[in-house]
Structures are given as C-alpha cells and as structure tokens.
C-alpha cells in the first residue's frame, strides 16, 4: 500500500498470452486468449511478496514465465503447458528465459550487481558487469546488441562479436530471435522501418512508416 510503482504484467510477443496479478487469488496467472485457458504461474503470494514484485517476463515462445520479488529474493518459473512450477532462490530480477535457463540478477532494482545466465540444473555463468543491462537481448537469449560504435551483435555465451550492424539506424529492437527492426531516418519520403537479418547483416525494406506505437513480433 505504500509502494508508488505499478505491478508489472507481461504479454507474449504473439499477443496470445497475458501474465497478470489476480487480486482475488493473490497470485499471478497467465491466460491464453485464443483458448481461454488460465493457469497459475506463482503460488499464493503474501502482501510483502506482491508489493515486492520486480519483474514479470515470458519466454519468446510464450511457454515459460518468470515472476520475481524482492521478498526473500526469489523467482518463480512456470511451464504454462505442463503447469510445472519451480522456485529459483537469490534471483531478484529476471530479464528473459528459455526452457532451460534465465537471465537474472540478485540485484532487486535491476542494477548494482552482475547479471548471470542461470541454468535450471543449478549452474550459472556470469554475463555482464553491473554497468550494463541486457534490455537488448534476442528473445532466445542467444545474442545481444552493444550500441557502442560500431553497433554490433554479440554472442551471449562467449561475448564474441558476430556482426557489425549498419550505421544510420536508431531505435533498434528484436522482432524475433534472428531479426532486428530499426528506424531508418534516411528514407527520402520520411522515416521508415527496416528489418536486419542478424545472421548476415542484410537490410530488408518492409514498407512500414515510422510510428512509436508499433510493436513487432512473431505470430504463431
């Protein structure tokens, strides 16, 4: 009741599933909109856990969800298809996840400590220092963008640069695991969007005029 922030929600890239706090049940649920199926993705939460929620994130394929809280520094990870739920201790903030791992931090504000790739078999690999945050990771966590000149794509597992991206683009973000979308201000008739193949660096005109309300994602 004393927190001025918002309880976060998450919508999968295809728009089919929404993860949200159900006030009546005091737990997070995910609803599959096409089928109407709803499944809990956390246990029933205490008031302290609810006001301490830091992040809610789904996997790129919409199957797995992670909900993190400051209270006891824990993250709940659930497979929507099976309902299997696990608790990952000492992870206070999640940035993304796949079937076997998540990118998380013990820092409850998303800053101040290192970010690790945490596998569900109990092992972890340091990813980045406290100075950098992985908001620019591909949905499958395989690659990330470093916006220092020249803007480049790096491999998450090794830190190896795999692709230098074209200059002159801005507002770059991932549309799917292998495709970036960016604003191109050099278009003669005004700003436009272009797609970039992260594997080859090829620019692909898509004919969509710039608008800050457009969201790109892969539809199943």
Image (tube, rainbow, N blue to C red):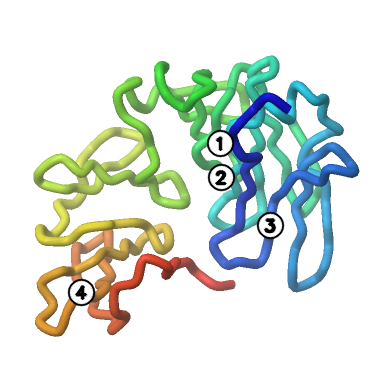
Say left or right for 175 vs 206.
right
Q: Nearer the viewer, residue 7 or 82?
A: 7
Does the residue at mark 2 contact the one at mark 1 (Cβ under 8 Å)?
yes
Name the element at disc 3: strand
Task: Name above or below for residue 20 compared with residue 109.
Answer: below
- First reached walking from the N terminus: tag 3 or tag 1: 3
Say left or right for 210 vs 147.
right
To which residue does mark 1 refer? 101
Instruction: Mark 2 vs mark 4: give the one in front.
Output: 4
How far apart, in angstroms, are the residues tagged by discs 2 and 3?
A: 17 Å
Residue 53 position by quadrant: top right
Say left or right for 74 vs 147.
right
To which residue does mark 2 refer? 98
Q: Please give the label number shown on residue 117.
A: none
How far apart, in angstroms, are the residues tagged by discs 4 and 3?
A: 31 Å
At x 34% / y 71%, what residue is drawn? Answer: 211
Report the quarter where the C terminus lies.
bottom right
Whole-percent x, y for residue 204 in the image = 23, 76
Instruction: Mark 4 vs mark 1: give the one in front.
Output: 4
To which residue does mark 4 refer? 191
To which residue does mark 3 refer? 18
The answer to whether residue 87 is visible is: no
């Amino acid at each position: 009741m004393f927190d001025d922030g918002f309880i976060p929600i998450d919508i999968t890239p295809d728009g089919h599933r929404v993860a949200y706090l159900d006030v009546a049940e005091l737990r997070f649920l995910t609803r599959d909109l096409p089928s109407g199926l709803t499944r809990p993705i956390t246990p029933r939460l205490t008031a302290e856990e609810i006001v301490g929620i830091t992040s809610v994130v789904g996997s790129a394929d919409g199957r797995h969800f992670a909900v993190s809280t400051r209270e006891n520094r824990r993250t709940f990870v659930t497979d929507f298809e099976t309902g299997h739920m696990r608790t990952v201790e000492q992870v206070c903030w999640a940035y993304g996840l796949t079937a076997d791992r998540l990118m998380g931090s013990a820092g409850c504000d998303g800053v101040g400590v290192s970010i690790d790739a945490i596998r569900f078999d109990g092992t972890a690999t340091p990813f980045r220092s406290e100075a950098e945050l992985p908001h620019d990771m591909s949905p499958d966590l395989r690659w990330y963008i470093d916006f220092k000149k020249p803007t480049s794509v790096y491999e998450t597992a090794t830190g190896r640069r795999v692709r230098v991206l074209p200059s002159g683009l801005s507002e770059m973000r991932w549309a799917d695991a292998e495709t970036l979308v960016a604003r191109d201000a050099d278009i003669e008739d005004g700003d436009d969007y272009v797609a970039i193949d992260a594997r080859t660096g090829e620019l692909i005109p898509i004919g969509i005029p710039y608008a800050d309300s457009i969201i790109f994602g892969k539809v199943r």
